[in-house]
Image (cartoon, helix red, strand yellow):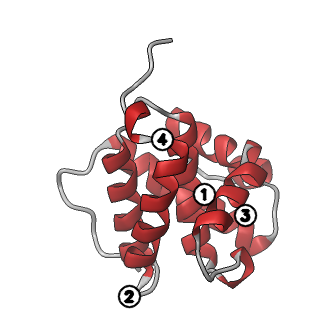
Amino acid sequence: MAPPRSPGSDRRSDARERALYLLYEAASKDAALDDVLAGQMSPPDELTVQLVHGVSEHRERLDAAIAARATGWSLARMAVLDLNVLRLAAFELAERPDVPVAVVIDEAVELAKRFSTDNSGKFVNGVLSALALDLRPPDDSHPRNP
């Protein structure tokens, strides 16, 4: 069981955590995400659903980007939880320019530390720091106007 969240946790952090649970459940059961979502006792909030669907819809592109920056690691060799943390963060880096890079990376590192191995936080930080340069170059790190 994971350690309790800090009292200052916000709904976005909670949505990311729930999205990670759902992505992990789908991967570990080899189930469709829509089936996993439909099987929830309490329906996930809108942000959780957006994150889960976003990862699902862009998975091939996200996996390619992660693989390109995870030096010495194949996706198959990564812990399932770490891979899903990376997918979730890569989706936010690529598709949610309103969320600052530092927030995306920090949230992902914290999820990895809480739910995965002792080395997962460092691994996730390293991959995402490199990936952020591809998905959100420094001159493009501020939110775009629609």
Task: Please name the residue that numbered disc 4 is placed on.
Answer: 136
Amino acid type at image mark 4: Arg
Q: Are marks 1 and 2 in contact (CB under 8 Å)?
A: no
Distance CA(mark 2)–CA(mark 3): 24 Å
In the image, residue 56 above or below residue 17? above
- Residue occupying image coordinates x 39% and y 33%: 139
Task: Please name the residue that numbered disc 2 is placed on.
Answer: 118
Q: Earlier in the sequence, mark 1 or mark 2?
A: 1
Amino acid type at image mark 1: Arg
- Residue occupying image coordinates x 62% and y 58%: 22
In the rendered image, is residue 23 in sight? yes
Q: Residue furthest bottom?
A: 118
The disc label shown at residue 87, or none: 1
In the image, residue 143 above or below residue 118? above
In the rendered image, is residue 43 in sight? no
Distance CA(mark 3)–CA(mark 1): 14 Å
Horizontal and vertical percent for residue 145? 44, 13
Around disc 2, counting alpha carbons within 10 Å, would you say few (fewer than 14), some (14 to 19), or many (20 or more)? few
Task: Please name the residue that numbered disc 3 is placed on.
Answer: 26
Q: Are marks 4 and 1 in contact (CB under 8 Å)?
A: no
Judging from the image, what secondary structure is the residue with disc 2 in?
loop
Horizontal and vertical percent for residue 126? 43, 70
